[in-house]
Image: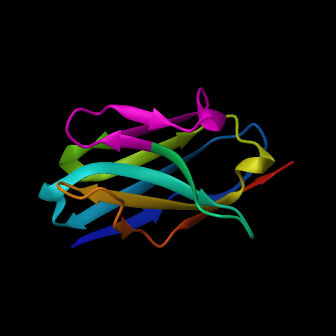
Amino acid sequence: QVQLVESGGGLVQAGGSLRLSCAASGRTWSLYRMGWFLQAPEKEREFVASISWSDGSTDYTNSVKGRFTISRDNAKNTVYLQMNSLKPDDTAVYYCAARIVGRYSYEYWGQGTQVTVSS
């Protein structure tokens, strides 16, 4: 089992920045990839970004490229999402997720953190 706890959400004006953190515990030795997803009201959960736990390679959805940066600190078992130039459309609950070695989907999820961007 892997436990994930997000922090760092809040209210920010358009154009502002926030940094989300996700601390992993439990079977962290089995981590393969970590990701961030968002879910806006009455919408499906969407992929935002992901990072390889081993080599740090990253992947982003097009709408956040150049604005958001995902990073990790293996020593702290923590993944970050730096969000710059925030827009009202970025308003959502952001979830951290973990995929472990040998599995093909994100099986572990955090509780989510609210990000609200005002215009």
Q: Is residue 70 left or right of residue 92?
A: left
Q: Is residue 46 left or right of residue 91?
A: left
Instruction: Indicate whether 97 appears above or below 86.
Output: below
Q: Residue at x 38, y 38 (%)?
A: 71
Question: Does residue 66 show up magenta in the picture?
Answer: yes
On the image, the x and y values in percent for residue 114 come to: 62, 65
**Quarter assignment of residue 3:** bottom left
Q: Which residue reaches farthest left?
A: 29
Q: Which residue reaches farthest top?
A: 66
> Can the viewer see residue 19?
yes
Instruction: Indicate whether 51 appears above or below 107.
Output: above
Quadrant (top left/top right/bottom left/bottom right) for the N terminus: bottom left
**Quarter assignment of residue 113:** bottom right
Q: Residue at x 87, y 48 (%)?
A: 119
Q: What is the magenta range?
A: 50-71
Q: Residue at x 39, y 60 (%)?
A: 97
Chosen colour scheme: rainbow
**Residue 114 or residue 8, whichever sits in front:** 114
